[in-house]
Amino acid sequence: MQASLELRSPIGVFDSGVGGLTVLQALRRRLPNRDFIYLGDTARVPYGRKPPAMVTEFAHSIANFLCGLGIEGLVVACNTASAVALSSLRESAPVPVWGVIDPGVEAATRATRSGRVGVIGTKGTIASGAYQRRLEARGIEPWAQACPMLVHVVEEGLAESPEAELLAREYLRSRPEIDTLILGCTHYPLLRNVLQRAVGEQVRLVDSAEVTAELVSAAFDQATDGDVLSRGRVIHFVTGDPLAFAHTAAVIGSVEGEIISLPIAELASTQVPAGE
């Protein structure tokens, strides 16, 4: 596509919808001169309710598409896709691949004092056990809770509403004594105030976006970025309605850069030749 020819060594970022924009924002703060391609698979959102095999297939077709545009690295800014597809993506992709789960676990390990950590996320993320297994491997006792309705609350612009307060308190009502809570969905940082009130100020909230951005930025040559005086550009591809994407994304933050419609058929047919 012509859009890719206008970018300088872009990094690819994808999510099932707009939540991954919180990760993109953190990446751009760390790498302000780097170009990015963001893909929001809004036609097939949410991933959290879909079978793991289906999510894995989606993730690979997206990775193939982005690699075909010449990205130098790939960030899976989706907890569900990170949980079920990260390992196979790392084996098949011709570029480095990062997810958001390991950085979240690392940040929680640093933050906890008691070794009792909670994680909230979509049904798919929690059912995968990805966070729980990693925390247990570090000697941490995890508690996990699926909170499927919180994504809808965020996308409807109700992050500070009474409805959000009621949902958060209900989802977290049965939690044991924890001192750290991982926000295991890229939408949840927008609910930070509500979630903090639900668990109390004594519980530390962990958002993996900043830690992910730290890891990704460390892998790229900062001197190269520093040689470029202009701020990096972003191109957004969306599989659903671009206007709906822009409207929903405005809840998370302004969308900077061109938004391009990407039909599912075109995405699914994209292949990257072996060895490239």
Image (cartoon, helix red, strand yellow):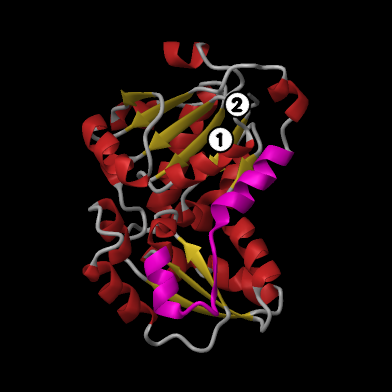
Q: Considering only vertical position in the picture, is 40 above or below 125?
A: above
- Against 208, residue 58 (above or below) is above
Q: Closest to the observer: 250 or 275?
A: 250
Q: Residues under labels 1 and 2: Cα distance?
A: 7 Å
Q: Is residue 135 left or right of residue 241?
A: right
- Find the magenta span and give its range: 193-218
Identity, as a three-letter code, of the amino acid under mark 1: Arg
Q: Which residue is mark 1?
A: 28
Q: Main secondary structure of the magenta part?
A: helix
Quadrant containing the N terminus is: top left
Q: Residue at x 30, y 60 (%)?
A: 159
The amino acid type found where label 2 is placed reads Arg
Q: Which corner quadrant of the image does residue 139 belong to?
A: bottom right
Residue 1 visible: no
SS for dot 2: loop
Residue at (55, 80) in percent of width and height: 202
Residue 41 drawn above or below residue 171: above
Residue 157 visible here: yes
Give the side of residue 60 with respect to residue 19, left or right.
Answer: right
Pinpoint residue 115: horizontal percent, then vertical percent: 66, 81
Q: Is the Cβ of the residue at disc 1 closer than 8 Å to that at disc 2?
A: yes
Residue 233, horizontal then vertical, whole percent: 50, 22
* 75 magenta-colored: no
Judging by the rendered image, the residue that carries numbered circle 2 is 34
Image quadrant for the C terminus?
top right
